[in-house]
Amino acid sequence: MLAKGQVLGKMVRSNNEQITISRAVEMKNWYAVQCKPNQDARAEEHLCNQQYEVYRPLARVRKRCQGQIRHAIESLFPRYLFVHLDDFMEDWGPIRSTRGVAQMVRFAGWPAVVPDDVIQQLHCHTDDHNCVDMTAAHYRPNQRVRVVEGPFSGYEGLFTSKKGEDRVIILLNIMHRAQQLVMPERAIEPA
């Protein structure tokens, strides 16, 4: 059994000359692919249809839409995904013309190799649906926040602490006095 990256040599005769043909045995690396705007999912689908191994980590995020906080799933790295390719055995040509793909990411003319441990770390931080949960706001004590809904909308204050799962305590300066207020976490954002 040959190890990953080990070379298998073979002698052949051609025009009375002996040549050694070498081929690598499963020398796979991850490469970054840049997608066309808003076509990450399309590129992923079409690359998978061509039997390429594709990894596109997703992020579960909070978005404000018409004054409401909504949860959405989007690419963790918008316009980028990763393809696991064999350096010698796979045909890279179809990738360039795949729907949704703009180009392979290159440095000095060579495709950018993404280290395996980077991909493994990304896998470690994703859930069963390939998502990184970014919906939980991580405020630090005394961090400046802005109230974005309710009667104090537009006021700025300091984050004090969380209260329960979805409520926060903030310190607002109202009528020249510091007042602690409890409000839904969705009602504030970093200032």
Image (spheres, rainbow, N blue to C red):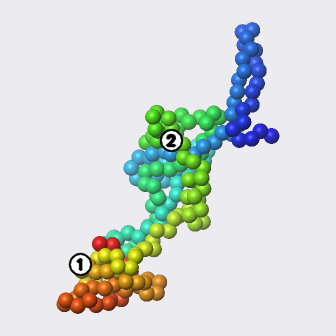
| Quadrant in the picture for the N terminus | top right
Left or right, 101 with respect to 113, comes to left
| Quadrant in the picture for the C terminus | bottom left
Q: Residue furthest front?
A: 142
- Say which quarter of the image contains residue 23: top right
Residue 37 percent across, percent down from the top left = 39, 49
- Numbered label attached to residue 144: none
Q: Mark 1: which secondary structure?
A: loop
Left or right, 98 with respect to 183, comes to right
Q: Label 1 is placed on what type of residue?
A: Gly
Residue 146 percent across, percent down from the top left = 29, 76
Q: Residue furthest right?
A: 1
Which one is earlier in the sequence, the residue at label 2 or at label 1?
2
Q: Mark 2: which secondary structure?
A: loop
Residue 57 percent across, percent down from the top left = 52, 57
Residue 113 percent across, percent down from the top left = 54, 43
Mark 2–mark 1 distance (CA, rounded to whole Å) = 45 Å
Q: Residue at left 58%, top 66%?
A: 127
Residue at numbered disc 2:
112
Residue in front for this viewpoint, 142 or 152: 142
Residue in front for this viewpoint, 48 or 58: 58
Q: Is residue 97 above or below residue 157?
A: above
Q: Residue at left 54%, top 46%?
A: 114
Q: Residue furthest top?
A: 16
Q: Is residue 30 above or below residue 133?
A: above
Callout 2–callout 1 Cβ contact below 8 Å: no
Left or right, 82 with respect to 15, comes to left
Q: How many marks?
A: 2
- Say which quarter of the image contains residue 145: bottom left
Residue at numbered disc 1:
154
Q: Label 2 is placed on what type of residue?
A: Ala
- Label 1 neighbour load within 10 Å: few <14, some 14-19, many 20+: few
